[in-house]
Image (cartoon, rainbow, N blue to C red):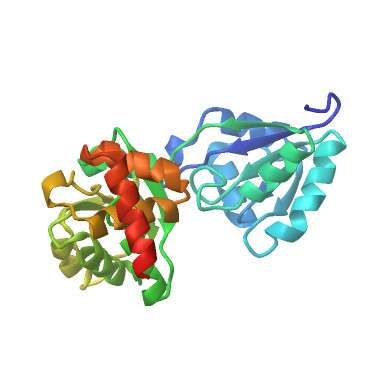
Amino acid sequence: MEQERSGVLVLAGTPIGDVDDAPPRLAAELAAADVVAAEDTRRLRRLAQALGAEVPGRVVSYFEGNEAARTGELVRALLDGSRVLLVTDAGMPSVSDPGYRLVEAAVAEGVRVTAVPGPSAVLTALALSGLPVDRFCFEGFLPRKAGERAGRLRDLAAEPRTLVFFESPHRIADSLAAMADAFGADRRAAVCRELTKTYEEIRRGPLDELAAWAQDGVRGEITVVVAGAPPADPSEVGPEALADLVAARESAGQPRKEAIAAVAAELGVPKRDVFDAVVAAKKSR
């Protein structure tokens, strides 16, 4: 239950490139906030100047390095009645950016949390990719170590939904090559670079072609969209493959019973066959 006299936490989206994409409410929220928690205070000042917005409240940094230590301070300000505005360098707070820890703590204390919706690299890239958008999942950044990255991609190889990743310029070539290995060289994908900026570029094609293109170097902020796994032919799916499909869903957090039912429904095979395949795989290990 929200406390009647507590403050309010406002999550505000910021431009992912073009400053003109800033939500109209952002300037008003900057002016109204008692505390502005910003991932980069210098970038915040530049954004406020570009918007012609005043920032009379206290400005504090809130980034990965101090997020754990500063969350308590911000929650205390909220409980004292302050209006706290949270902004990150680009896009919505909490989406691969600082924010989740503060939202979780504020909700636990019964503080009201609201948002100023704004630009999203995830949704923008998805819309521009030319790939199916009816069902998708966001995976954020892949692990930096090659072995861990390969393992994560293997877990996603059977995922039928469109996949969205963030990646850095110096890792994009290796990541695309790893995706081609895990998903298949001909799996369709799109590399979306510098979205809404002057040098925006969308490269679409099979993963092997995109991996070869990236070897020459890719600059800027990058979002990768990859088509989901194509529907499997039930007649060609053996017990080991059934067990692997269930294991992939379990790795993503789905309970085993639900995973078995989902695989059975997706392939049009009896649930008992899928269950037996899982049991057999477990005994063989």
Q: Going 54% across and 37% down the picture, which residue do you hit?
A: 51
Where residue 59 sits in the image (x, y, percent)?
A: 73, 49
Quick check: 156 left or right of 216? Answer: right
The quadrant of the rendering that contains the N terminus is top right
Residue in the picture at 65% in, 65% down: 65
Q: Is residue 164 left or right of residue 42?
A: left
Q: Closer to the camera, 175 or 195?
A: 175
Quadrant for residue 120, please give it.
top left
248 above or below 79?
below
Q: Give the percent coordinates (x, y) of residue 103.
A: 67, 42
Is any atom of residue 224 visible in this view? no
The x, y position of residue 213, in whole percent, is 17, 66
Is residue 108 at all visible to an observer of this figure?
A: yes
Identify the image quadrant of the C terminus.
Answer: bottom left
Q: Residue at x 25, y 64 (%)?
A: 182
Q: Nearer the viewer, residue 151 or 113?
A: 151
How many numbered marks are there?
0
Looking at the image, residue 174 lies above or below residue 71: below
Residue plotted at (27% across, 53% down):
242
Q: Residue farthest to the top?
A: 4
- The x and y percentages for residue 271 are 31, 40
Residue 207 location, quadrant: bottom left
